[in-house]
Image (spheres, helix red, strand yellow):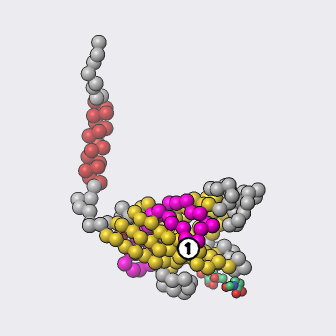
Amino acid sequence: MASSPSVSPFLKTALAAAALAVAFLSPATLAAEKETHLHLFTHERQIPPNRTVVTSVSIPTSPHRFGAGFGSILLFDNLLAAGSDPASRHLGRSQGLVAFTSLNGEDILIVNTLVFKEPGPFAGSSITLLARNPLAEKVRELPVVAGTGKFRLARGYALQRSYYSNATSGVNIFEFDLFLLHH
Ligand SMILES: *[C@@H]1O[C@H](CO)[C@@H](O)[C@H](O)[C@H]1NC(C)=O
Ligand SMILES: *[C@@H]1O[C@H](CO)[C@@H](O)[C@H](O)[C@H]1NC(C)=O
């Protein structure tokens, strides 16, 4: 005998609770969508003292074209600044993780949050990039997947260039052009 589909009382209660939670969490209104272009630099120091990047997993047997092989993992907490000079206006930090995800040692997966910590129009806000980053390319296009504060619901893309690199001092400076849509 066919019975009509029924919803258990437990499921009904759970669904009602979920609907209520959504109603309470949704902001009443969302600001109009804005377009923002940012030009920023991040400063990395690979060598102590005050190194800003550490290797947490090192795989010694792969090609190491960019300093680490397939399977290696690095964590970083770099300076985020307005200019390529480390003495330029400090904006915050560029924090995240790099995983070497290609057999030839040339491509990485990057999870990178740009955190605006210093006083300024974006103080307390952040932008998150999640991307395959092909290091051999001069200009890398990286998707922006999220943001907080002034960059809520951010999406867009970043163009990243290696602006300066010095193996002796261990200093790397990256240039970012970010094109964002956000609320
Ligand atoms: C390392 O950081 C300390 C504390 O901020 C600073 O005094 C020192 O000059 C830094 N050293 C270098 C080589 O940047
Ligand atoms: C690289 O860093 C070393 C050590 O700090 C410095 O002597 C040298 O001038 C730098 N080279 C360039 C091209 O900036």
Q: Is residue 111 magenta?
A: no
Magenta stretch: give its range.
115-144
Query: Is residue 174 at least partly visible in the picture?
Result: yes
Graded by Cα atoms within 10 Å as few (under 14), some (14 to 19) or many (20 or more), the crowding at tag 1 reads some
Foreground pick, 134 / 38: 134
Quarter of the figure that contains the C terminus: bottom left
In this rendering, position of residue 80 left or right of residue 10: right
Q: Is residue 77 above or below residue 111?
A: below
152 up-or-down from 78: above or below: above
Q: Residue at x 62, y 76 (%)?
A: 172
Outermost residue to the left: 28
101 over 160 or under it: above or below: above
| Element type where label 1 sits in the image | strand
**Amino acid marked by disc 1:** Arg
Return the x and y of residue 118 as percentages of the image width and height.
44, 78
Q: Quadrant of ligand 2?
A: bottom right
Point out the image quarter for the N terminus: top left
User: Which of 1/181 is in front?
Assistant: 181
Give the labeled residue for mark 1.
161
In the picture provided, is 44 more to the left or to the right than 60? left
